């Protein structure tokens, strides 16, 4: 995990953010990137992309995730993006519900074969 975090922090195309509670305990994180390759539903490049977002369960449904998405939108604008995108696994209904509740719209479903 430390190697992954180091890669994110040293990347020119990625950023990582941690949310802490009043006691300084980490309660959530978000990983953003600038994607220049194809992003379903996007009309321009680059696209600000939520690579990962997580909020500790006891802090969910309190506006923390919505705040992070609003922050991501601002981060994207600061990096020349007019669109914000993300994804979720088909079976991750909780993530799907979160994404739609903060304003994302489903644009594609994918099943990958190997």
Image: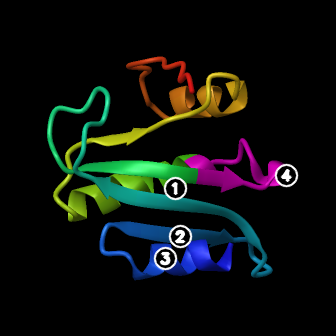
Q: Which mark is residue 17?
A: 2
Front disc: 1 or 2: 2
Front disc: 3 or 2: 3
Q: Which mark is residue 98?
A: none
Is 52 on the left-hand or right-hand side of 13?
right
Quarter of the image where the C terminus is located: top right
Q: Is residue 89 above or below residue 34?
A: above
Is 32 on the left-hand or right-hand side of 29?
left
Magenta stretch containing residue 99, yes or no?
Answer: no
User: Residue tagged by mark 4?
Assistant: 58
SS at mark 1?
A: helix
Q: Which mark is residue 68?
A: 1
For disc 1, the neighbor class at 10 Å (few under 14, some 14 to 19, many from 20) is many
How far apart marks 1 and 2 lie (CA) works out to 9 Å
Q: Position of residue 30 (x, y in %)?
A: 55, 60
Evaluate if marks 4 and 1 touch, with contact meaning CB atoms under 8 Å apart.
no
Residue at 56% over, 52% down: 52
Q: Position of residue 105 (x, y in %)?
A: 42, 23
């Amino acid at each position: 995990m430390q190697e992954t975090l180091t890669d994110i922090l040293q990347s020119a195309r990625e950023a990582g953010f941690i949310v802490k509670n009043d006691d300084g305990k980490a309660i959530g994180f978000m990983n953003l990137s600038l994607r220049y390759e194809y992003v379903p539903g996007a009309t321009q490049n680059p696209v600000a992309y939520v690579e990962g977002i997580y909020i500790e369960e006891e802090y969910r449904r309190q506006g923390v995730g919505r705040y992070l998405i609003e922050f991501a939108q601002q981060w994207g604008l600061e990096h020349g993006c007019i669109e914000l995108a993300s994804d979720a696994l088909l079976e991750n209904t909780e993530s799907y519900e979160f994404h739609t509740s903060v304003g994302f719209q489903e644009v594609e479903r994918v099943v990958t074969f190997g």
